[in-house]
């Protein structure tokens, strides 16, 4: 039994060295046909990094040839499996453009969008890839309305959309919080919240955005000069009414009523003066 185990180990090590030797020889001095054959072999063996190295070598020789369609898809898929999502997204996108009649076109279009989504960072960072993913999923949904992947594509689209909504909301809150040291940021916060509500109709963040919008108007009243207070009081009351009109049972209603009382006091003080 021990002898069999030793022989098995020797055989496995031999195979490993032969495999490494074959790869090194083919990369260094192999013909393009041998490199292509080994690239496919490595791809099928899920050795994607090695497959990509070989594909890089053969692509110039196979450009314009029938094999290029398969190569381009395998390159995109290899990058995806290696978690190089931004590269994979671009490669799948190029595949759909270069081979619009391919049987792999629908899969490539979906994976392009999904790769952009996986490359998309948290909402606090730059959202370039998030926007690319949204566009790519919308393109997929429009192009393949009967796809088996349609439900999943719509789910990803909604999640990406919410990430952009969250990004906008956090920017608005940041402006609001920093307005304590720069009063101009109250107006910036109001603009951001207005854009969020208008750009993302039906957003789950609408109630809280309207609340912070009203708070920004309220705080502007408090810090305003008497000359500017009358108009700002009107704007603040209108902001309160918009919140209550859209969310009559808002969880922020108790605090909003308290803020409204403060605004009314400011209004009375103006009348007295």
Image: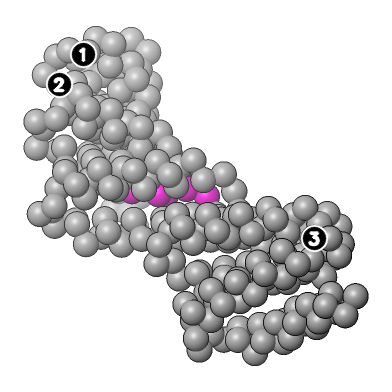
**Residue located beneath label 3 in the image:** 228
Q: Is residue 218 visible?
A: yes
In the image, farthest residue toward the front: 272
The residue positioned 22% from the left and 45% from the top of the image is: 140
Q: Which mark is residue 62?
A: 1
From what the image shows, is residue 243 above or below residue 115?
below
Quick check: is 97 in the magenta stretch?
Answer: no
Image height of 81 relative to 25, above or below = below
Q: In this figure, which residue is indicated by the disc labeled 2?
A: 67
Q: Residues within 10 Å of mark 2 (few under 14, many from 20)?
A: few
Measured in 3D between alpha carbons, the distance from the residue under mark 3 to the one under mark 1, in whole angstroms, is 71 Å
**Are the residues flagged by discs 2 and 1 in contact, CB closer than 8 Å?**
yes
Q: Earlier in the sequence, mark 2 or mark 1?
A: 1
Q: Nearer the viewer, residue 71 or 247?
A: 247
Numbered range of the magenta stretch: 114-121
Residue at x 78% of width, y 77% of height: 267
């Amino acid at each position: 039994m021990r002898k069999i185990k030793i022989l098995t180990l020797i055989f496995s090590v031999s195979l490993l060295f032969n495999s490494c030797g074959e790869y090194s020889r083919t990369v260094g001095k192999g013909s393009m046909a041998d490199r292509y054959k080994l690239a496919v072999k490595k791809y099928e063996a899920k050795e994607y990094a090695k497959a990509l190295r070989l594909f890089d070598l053969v692509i110039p020789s196979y450009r314009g040839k029938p094999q290029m369609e398969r190569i381009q898809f395998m390159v995109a898929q290899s990058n995806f499996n290696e978690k190089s999502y931004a590269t994979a997204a671009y490669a799948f996108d190029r595949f759909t453009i270069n081979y619009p009649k391919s049987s792999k076109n629908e899969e490539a279009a979906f994976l392009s969008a999904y790769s952009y989504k996986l490359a998309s960072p948290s909402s606090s960072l730059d959202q370039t890839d998030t926007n690319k993913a949204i566009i790519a999923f919308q393109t997929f949904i429009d192009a393949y309305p009967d796809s088996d992947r349609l439900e999943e594509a719509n789910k990803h689209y909604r999640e990406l959309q919410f990430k952009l909504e969250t990004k906008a909301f956090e920017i608005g809150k940041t402006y609001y919080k920093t307005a304590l040291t720069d009063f101009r940021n109250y107006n910036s916060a109001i603009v951001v919240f207005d854009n969020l509500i208008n750009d993302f109709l039906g957003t789950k963040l609408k109630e809280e955005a309207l609340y912070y919008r009203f708070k920004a108007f309220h705080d502007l009243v408090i810090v305003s000069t008497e000359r500017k207070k009358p108009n700002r009081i009107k704007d603040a009351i209108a902001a309160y009414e918009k919140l209550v009109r859209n969310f009559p049972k808002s969880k922020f209603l108790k605090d909003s009523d308290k803020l409204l009382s403060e605004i009314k006091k400011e209004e009375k003080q103006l009348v007295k003066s």
